[in-house]
Amino acid sequence: MRCYYVMVHGSLNWVGAAPAEGGSQPRGFYCHRYVLASDEQSATDIAFERVRLNLDRSFGWLSDDSVVLTMEVEEIRTAPFRKLLKPDNRGHTFYEQL
């Protein structure tokens, strides 16, 4: 098992009408996760699942079918095990324009 740093890029394709005034519909986001996995594919799967769960818990976009989420790995590399001791970074950097 190794610690991996996974940088995730997510694209958000919205279904339906725009939100009420003041709401936003970001087009995508970037975030990263440190995960413990046996290989890069497992690390990718674990990171994607964590990102998906966090987005749904924070915004509810996925469970109410407001958006279709597509994710890809921008960067993946091994990282020191001490990175796993830090609390999971649950933040996302959203962008509006493509």
Image (tube, grey):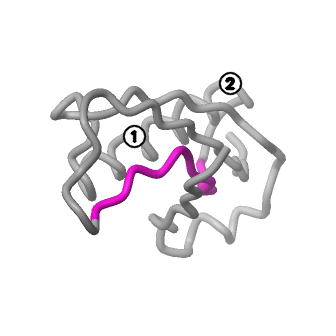
How many residues crowd around disc 2 within 10 Å: few (fewer than 14), some, or many (20 or more)?
Answer: few
* First in sequence: mark 2 vs mark 1: 2
The foreground one among 85 and 11 is 11
User: Do we see residue 79 in this rendering?
Assistant: yes
- What type is the residue that disc 2 sits on? Gln
Badge 2 element: helix
Image height of 84 relative to 2, above or below: below
Counting labels gives 2
14 left or right, relative to 93: left
Q: What's the residue at 59%, 55% (across, down)?
A: 33
Residue at the spot of label 2: 41
Magenta region, residue range? 23-35
Q: Is residue 19 left or right of residue 55?
A: left
Q: Dividing the image into 4 quarters, which one contains the N terminus?
A: top right
User: Is 33 contained in the magenta span?
Assistant: yes
Residue type (three-letter) at the residue carrying disc 1: Arg
Which disc number belongs to residue 52? Answer: 1
Residue mark closest to the camera, 2 vs 1: 1
Residue 69, image x and y in percent? 45, 30
Distance, label 2 to label 1, CA atoms, is 16 Å
Judge by depth and name the residue closer to the eye, 6 or 19. Answer: 19
Tell me the number on the disc at residue 28: none
Asked if residue 31 is among those painted magenta in the image, a careful observer would answer: yes
Q: Estimate the x, y position of residue 83 in percent, counting from the top left.
A: 66, 68
